[in-house]
Image (spheres, rainbow, N blue to C red):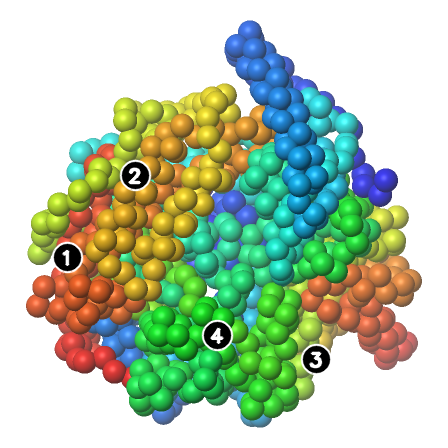
Amino acid sequence: MSTQIPKQTENAEETASETETEAPSKGDERRAEKRRRADERRRQREAEEAERAAADENTVELRVFRYDPDVEGKQEPRFDTFHVPFTKGMTVLDALMYARDTYDSSLTFRHSCRQAVCGSDAMFVNGGQKLACKTQIDELEEPIRVEPLPHAEVTKDLVVDMEHFYDQMEAVEPYFQTNEYPDGELEEQRQTRENREKVKMSTRCIWCAACMSSCNIAAGDNEYLGPAAINKAYRFAMDEREGEDLKQKRLEIIEQEHGVWRCQTQFSCTEVCPKDIPLTEHIQELKREAVKNNLKFW
Amino acid sequence: MYEHDVVVVGAGGAGLRAAIAAQEEGADVAIVSKLHPVRSHTGAAEGGINAALRDADSWEDHAYDTMKGSDYLGDAPAVEALCKESPEEVIQLEHWGMPFSREEDGRVSQRPFGGLSFPRTTYAGAETGHQMLHTMYEQVVKRGITVYDEWHVMDLVVTNEEDPADRSCHGVVAYDIQRGEVDGFRANGGVILATGGMGQVFDHTTNAVANTGDGVAMAYRAGVPMEDMEFIQFHPTTLPSTGVLISEGVRGEGGILYNEKGERFMFEHGYANNDGELASRDVVSRAELTEVNEGRGIEDEYVHLDMRHLGEERILDRLENILHLAEDFEGADGLTEPMPVKPGQHYAMGGIETNEHGETVIEGLYAAGECACASVHGANRLGGNALPELIVFGKRAGHHAAGKEMGEAEIPTGRTGDWEPAEYEFEVDVGAVGDRGPAAADGGAVAADAEGLLEAEIERARERVEDLLARKGRNHAEIRSAVQETMTANVNVFREEEGLKESLADLREAREAYAEVAVSDPSRTFNTDLIHTMETRNILDIAEALAMGALARREFRGAHWRKERQERDDENWLKHTLVSWNDGEPELWYKPAILEGEAKTYEPKVRSY
């Protein structure tokens, strides 16, 4: 299995025992009752599903990764099967929402905008990093296997811990800096169309982490900045409004030990990027800039 | 318990701008959001930011266009603040590095938008909101502002004096989605609500799944009135199958609408003889639905938006994102075929009643952005006026909450001045159900001081969570979809008395069903079942106030059309609708619109385009 499951943490156990001290017998009873109900619902759902699958040919079969450190019966990772009636234009996200709202309201995944801009719902669909909201069901082979992003710690079901990704993004001074602003009040900095075009693709990143998840180097080197963060650095390094001094600083950041030179040009990030950002090219270009820059000072 | 000077709820455009502004004034500020900031729905805004940047343009012209667009229900002091301050805020964004589209001379590009007398919509391709959101989040990172992401704010911590005008706000209680714990955030300076839209009240919407109007509903339960909730913008160009937005920028650049017969109906059927496709959004949405209702729609559902004649180069330069959206979400190639579009819920003109500083009637409680109603948009928002609202009023609220001296506001809040009670008698019950048990509790615990108040509210929120997890009952999803169905069927673009009454009866049923709601996922980890269940209550509160306002307002103004009276009635209705929760017994009342501005008095005129 490609997904890393964290060990049941001591913290979680502590929390559970704390709750117990507060309301010892009641809490136990309630949890036991919850489990009974959950089992019952599961049996019922499986029966319903079997019936539906037999009755209706036009359903899609999803096999969805399930894991919850908090709930007995889900602490061991497993796959649940859902049969969802197919409608034209249905996406993987639509199917997951249907399964959740109809069969099992504990099925958990991040999602918000439904239009590929919030970057919440990157997941591993049939063995590839995809945004669930822009992945059409009819383009996939069945059964459709849906898993959380590989190389990230699973929080629950399809939700992974994003903290490491955010830390890397924020490690490259991801904000515009300049030493000079125009004198006039209400005057913008000038930027050529060509320069805006140059950084355009890099500014489309939606922080979905599909690239980071697909990258072998990032999987082996936890400190590697990763494609998204390097792309963010590219976005500023190539923006002519920042000026030469700052470009120097940008190159120093991306040239660090766990920076651009770790990239082995495997193009997996570029392949999975849902916004078609040429990530590998951007990394390569920064390498060239760094070399040029070093020669200049040599 | 956490403690900060200013607590901002929500991390979209308004929340981020408010946080930056409060920090600039020296406040210790924290942002609490149920999403990570870059997931906020500001990122889906496409078209642009209206700002009078050029010599040939003026803020006065922008204000005139906005008042006309609002169908004279905007409040002039708020409208003028928006138009005056938008230029400096846009330049500020540019100075923070936002990648705007550029002219040959390197200046930021502007384009025409509906209802504008000058092409003043400043844009970054068709992804202006995405660029704005990320640019501002970058500034938040730069400043080291604390962000509590994936914390769902459940309720406000507000004192319980009888008159809301005497109450004060001291913080919020929130649920940590990752860890499953309730905790409190004490705010010594102020709480700023910036929770965005409420599109999930409807089922065909451009809004995100997260747009459940949380801030509006929690302010309402704490005693702040909801203002002008019946004014909902239905955007004329959304994709039929998903509600994904196709920017007004397409029409701004010259895109044309056709009916099934290939007629350019905006002109040929006389909906807007001067401006055609670039008439105000409410006008275009009604025109499209009229075409469909009269049998000239395609597949009896939608019309065509054609941009092929703009040419590949121009489309790729200015509207590339539209090609991706049409392809990914409707399977249409905008370069070679017209795109199917129909009206969809897009924006709430109404919201939390505030003045032009973002203050509500409750001391220490502010609101900014789509969740607020200052009112800048009145009965109809112009395209390109939402993004400047976020930055102008986000900044104002942030400054005020951090203690900056801003002078006396001109817009009154609460029941002061010339307010009047509504005479309308509702036939069905509204408001709280039964004994208002824990699942329907509202704000206002009793305690001697702020600290005690927070403790009490935290305890109550914990009990509510435990109760929702422990009890048996109905799943929220069926209740939510019942609300969305009745709202879309009965409180849509065209509204009539019978349908509106039916919606209130349906909402009553949904409220009763919600009294029996329960969460089936027992988990303490990332329990979205629990979050959605709490959100559904907010959806119910908002839907009800919206339908009440719509039923009582018997006139046609801006986005609110009534079959019974298809014209604007300035004699009786040049006034804002307000709904107060009154601890469970919603009450409708009105206050006059303010048409006297600094530049001029905006006399109501016939609104034609």
Q: Are marks 4 and 1 on the same chain?
A: yes
Q: Are marks 3 and 2 on the same chain?
A: no
Q: Mark 4 or mark 1: which is in front?
A: 4
Residue located 32% across and 55% down the image: B490
Q: Is residue A139 left or right of residue B201?
A: right
Name the residue that disc number 1 marks. Answer: B591
Q: Mark 4 or mark 2: which is in front?
A: 4
Instruction: Inspect the image, locate mark 3, and give the three-letter code of the amino acid beneath it.
Output: Lys
Instruction: Inspect the image, locate mark 2, and give the three-letter code of the amino acid beneath it.
Output: Arg
Marks 4 and 1 sit apart, C-alpha to C-alpha, by 43 Å
Q: Is residue B344 left or right of residue A215?
A: left
Residue located 66% across and 35% down the image: A51
Answer whether residue B277 is visible to the viewer in this image.
Answer: yes
Name the residue that disc number 3 marks. Answer: A198
Residue located 58% across and 61% down the image: A115
Q: Are marks 2 and 1 on the same chain?
A: yes
Figure check: B404 above or below B563: above
Q: Mark 4 or mark 3: which is in front?
A: 4
Q: Residue B153 appears at what percent x and percent y?
A: 45, 40
Figure check: B185 above or below A235: above
Between residues B367 and B142, which one lies in front from this camera angle?
Answer: B367
Query: Under tag 3, what secondary structure?
Result: helix
Name the residue that disc number 4 marks. Answer: B298
Q: Where residue B508 is drawn, which disc sits there?
A: 2
Q: Categorize mark 4 by other alpha carbons within 10 Å: few (<14), some (14-19), many (20+).
A: some
- Disc 1 + disc 3, Cβ < 8 Å: no
Query: Under tag 4, what secondary structure?
Result: loop
Instruction: Inspect the image, locate mark 1, and give the three-letter code of the amino acid beneath it.
Output: Lys
Marks 4 and 3 sit apart, C-alpha to C-alpha, by 40 Å
